[in-house]
Image (cartoon, rainbow, N blue to C red):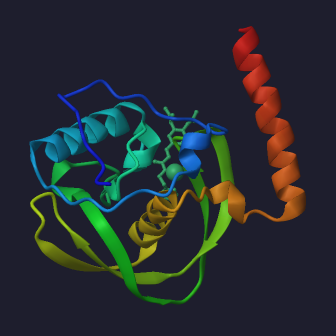
Amino acid sequence: MPYRLEIRKMKLSIVEYPDKKLREISKEVKSFDKSLHDLLDSMYFIMLNTNGIGLAAIQVSFALRALILNIPDDEGEQTKENLLEMINPIVTHKNGETLYQEGCLSVPKFYEDIERFENVRVNYQDRHGNTRSIDADGLLSIAIQHEMDHLEGILFIDKLSYARRKKFEKEYKRMLKEKKES
Ligand code: Y12
Ligand code: CO
């Protein structure tokens, strides 16, 4: 059954771990209409307001294969010209290995070294349904892989070793408790 969007420039909020919503497999986007554009615009707004550089639709409760990325330029500026919107992305080539300390708006305050492919080629659609392709390296490549994992219900913490994950769970639980008490 196609995923129906009912969005009117809505105020979105970020879904945080351990919310089960983050485990959903997102569905293909089939309509490239105003509702999708409103969702993407609202995602951009919340991502900038929370100091993010990447966000998948599932992180704002919409299980759709849509993500946005806004990697800072060499001066550290996040400009709208560098905004990348990827709909229905598919990795067609990947190679190399790289390690980077990742963070996620859905797992606040935690950063972990995660291994990724160094380069990826991705086919995707833009907000109008046009087919596009990009060869990514560096931070963009890492961010694309991180956001594409969200489409499969995968979080960067799932890639930690057993021992590191246990440590994370303990610290995260403590953080949530402190947040509740404050
Ligand atoms: C490399 C690694 C990870 C990605 C995925 C995109 N990740 C983010 O955009 C993470 C943003 C983030 C922002 C935070 O700041 C605020 O929430 C205000 C943050 O700080 C706290 O949680 C306190 C943590 C993560 C792309 C490339
Ligand atoms: Co994330």
Total labels drawn? 0
Give the image quarter of residue 108.
top right
Residue 136, horizontal then vertical, whole percent = 35, 77
* Residue at image coords 39%, 80%: 91
* Residue at image coords 35%, 31%: 49
Residue 64, horizontal then vertical, whole percent = 35, 53
Residue 145, horizontal then vertical, whole percent = 48, 69
Q: In the current view of this chain or complex, which residue is farthest to the front? A: 1
Is residue 71 visible in the rendered image? The answer is: no
Q: Is residue 171 above or below residue 92?
A: above
Give the image quarter of residue 50.
top left
Would you say 62 lies left or right of 44 here? right
In depth, the one of 83 and 20 nearer the eye is 20
Is residue 17 visible in the rendered image? The answer is: yes
Q: In the current view of this chain or complex, which residue is farthest to the top? A: 182
Residue 114, horizontal then vertical, whole percent = 65, 66
Would you say 35 lies left or right of 72 here? left
* Residue at image coords 16%, 55%: 31
Quadrant in which the C terminus is drawn: top right
In depth, the one of 31 and 117 nearer the eye is 31
Q: Is residue 171 above or below residue 124?
A: above
Quadrant in which the N terminus is drawn: bottom left
Would you say 71 lies left or right of 26 here? left
* Residue at image coords 78%, 21%: 177
